[in-house]
Image: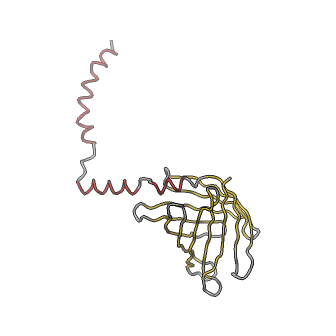
Amino acid sequence: MHRKLAFALLPLSLLATAPLLAQDAPPAMSPEEAAMMAAYQAAGTPGDAHAALARMAGDYTLSIRSWNSPDAPPTVETGTATRSMALGGRVLVEEVQSQMYGQPFTGRGMSGYDNVTGKYWSTWNDSMSTGIMLSEGDCDADGACAFTGSWNDPVSKEKINARMTTRWTSPAVEVFEMYAPGPDGKESKMMEITYTRK
């Protein structure tokens, strides 16, 4: 009997609470607010550039060559990298394990494409620093990219500007190159990393 009474009163209780629920509904947006919301949604929606980044996800072996001086032979070391997409397909995260001048080395990079600026961007942190490297650039349809970036030099305490290029020499091999001012202030190659997909 109590159950029948409860079901009979349910429609009345819903009618009584309907005005309260309506009061909790958000107010209608003005045209300006609607335009702002649309702009934010467009800025946050992954597109073709993010799909191109996603195609780089996977596991790689690394061959690393580093130059202390343009006239000296490079130091050659090896490592591994794992790339995966994060934030709902918006950012490519790279985890690196290797050696640097005979010492264990770990690094993490993030790469993305900013729908607002129309530019690719990247960050880099590693176990040899407590700072960050920030870069920005462009990539073509073949995945070749040119970036410029900077970091704070531990010795001079000044900002060091560098440029980086990447290119795919085959579907499984990517070559990264970094150029920065040498001891004479002229640009010289300081690093080359060959990524080979496992």
Tell me if residue 158 comes above or below residue 54 in the rendering. below
Q: Is residue 35 left or right of residue 165?
A: left
Indicate the position of residue 135 as horizontal and vertical percent values. 52, 69
How many numbered marks appear? 0
Quadrant assignment, res 109: bottom right
Give me the residue at 70% from left, 73% from top: 66
* Side (left or right) of 77 relative to 115: right
Quadrant including the N terminus: top left
Figure check: 133 above or below 37: below
Between 64 and 154, the residue placed more toward the observer is 64
For residue 69, side relative to residue 51 (left or right):
right
Here the colouring is secondary structure
Task: Residue at 64% x, 76% y: name it.
Answer: 189
- Viewer-closest of 1 and 65: 65
- Farthest residue to the top: give it: 1
Q: Position of residue 123 (x, y in %)?
A: 55, 65
At 49% from the left edge and 67% from the top edge, which residue is drawn?
Answer: 138
Coordinates of residue 58 in the picture (x, y in percent): 62, 52
Residue furthest right as drawn: 102
Image location of residue 146, percent across then percent down: 53, 69
